[in-house]
Image (cartoon, rainbow, N blue to C red):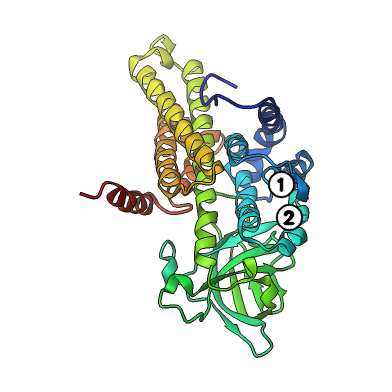
Amino acid sequence: MGRLAQTEGLTDIQEEILKTVHDFTEARIIPVAQELEHSDTYPAEIVEGLKELGVFGIMIPEEYGGLGESLLTYALCVEEIARGWMSVSGVINTHFIVAHMLMNHGTEEQKQKYLPRMATGEVRGAFSMSEPGLGSDVSAVSTKAVKQDDGSYEITGNKMWLTNGGTSTLVAVLTKTDEGAESVYRNMTTFLVEKTPGFGEVEQGITVPGKIDKMGYKGIDTTEMVFDHHKIAAEQILGGEPGKGFFQMMDGVEVGRVNVAARACGLAIRGFELGIAYAQQRHTFGKAIAEHQAILFRLAEMATKVETAHAMMVRAARLKDTGERVDVDAGMAKMLASEYANEVVEDSFRIHGGYGYSKEYEIERLMREVKFMLIGEGTSDIQKMIIGRQLLKEYKA
């Protein structure tokens, strides 16, 4: 580990966990990332290794079989894993959003039922809010859960952009329900939907058509999910009460935005590492290009952006660990980290020159992967709206 992106005030346990994940990334992820990404192959062996390390249970309390660590510890692990291959960090992102929602909003029965098996990775979580006709406009959710005479529900609708949509076995699904509330936000309910992994008809009334082909974020399965009168018991409502889905999802999204900020930091770190290494290997006009002032200035700016993004991400994670609302802080961290990561990776791409355009070089993969950071868990424009509206409330004239 270099001097960049260091975190002060970590415990010995946190340091040990991070070193273990760093060593795993160096030995098991970076050497195979290029091959798996180019072939769009699911990283099965890497995922099994993460299970053995206990990464799937980092934040889950010890009483449910997890490590009971903080969001900060989790975010720093994500940063390190994304530095190796961003897709792998996506495998655990939605898993932990679901685990976080269960920990904070689930009934005790739901926690006992799912968290111990989520800690081992036996149960794999996915998070489903978006639909083909909506992204950040959550109020436009059209997937409906209709209450039946026996108290159960039937879910019908189309969901979109499910990370882990095929490999997951437990999906937190936001639906519209008729609770008679005047606000659309109080007529939404989150269901814990169980399914078998795979594609096609994976459960009664649930079809996962297949993987969506993407420019980057390869290896991991991103899917649609189609519900056609899927029957589900009322006991599968997160928290046991309908009408609270929007607020539960927003809590999960805050964790997701810290995660995306951490992923962006990991990409920025790797982009910087590749750029500064190549700048010392490549020679022009009789000296390494790192000795040319134009490249030297570029490296200095890249390093400063890496440090700034990391600091913002760490601050947001620490605030979330206190239990405070962090919509502004998580939004700022996500926006800044994603924008800076794009700039750092592009600068590294420029340093590589023509070789950066070749699939033989890792920076080509990073150039495609980093674009997802600009849209994942809400675009920069959405973050600005959230931040600006909250600032107007706090600084009202």
Residue found 63% across the figure and 62% down from its top: 165
Quarter placement of the N terminus: top right
Observer-nearest of 117 and 350: 117
Residue found 77% across the figure and 62% down from its top: 113
Q: Nearer the viewer, mark 2 or mark 1?
A: 1
Observer-nearest of 301 and 67: 67
Res 79 label: none
Q: Amino acid at mark 1?
A: Pro
Residue found 48% across the figure and 35% down from its top: 315
The reply to whether dot 2 and dot 1 touch (C-beta < 8 Å) is yes
Label 1's element? Answer: loop
Q: Amino acid at mark 2?
A: Leu
Q: Position of residue 321 (x, y in %)?
A: 56, 42
Q: Which residue is under mark 1?
A: 61
Q: Position of residue 324 (x, y in %)?
A: 49, 46
* Residue 362 in the figure: left or right of residue 25: left
Q: CA distance from mark 2 to mark 1?
A: 9 Å
Q: Position of residue 97 (x, y in %)?
A: 60, 53
Q: Position of residue 23 (x, y in %)?
A: 70, 28
Q: Is residue 355 above or below residue 130?
A: above
Q: How many marks?
A: 2
Label 2's element? Answer: helix
Rate crowding at label 1 as few (under 14), some (14 to 19) or many (20 or more) other CA atoms within 10 Å: some
Let me know if residue 282 appears in the view: yes
Q: Is residue 298 above or below residue 42?
A: above
Let me know if residue 353 appears in the view: no
Q: Earlier in the sequence, mark 2 or mark 1?
A: 1
- Using the rendered view, name the quadrant where residue 198 is placed: bottom right
Q: Which residue is under mark 2?
A: 115
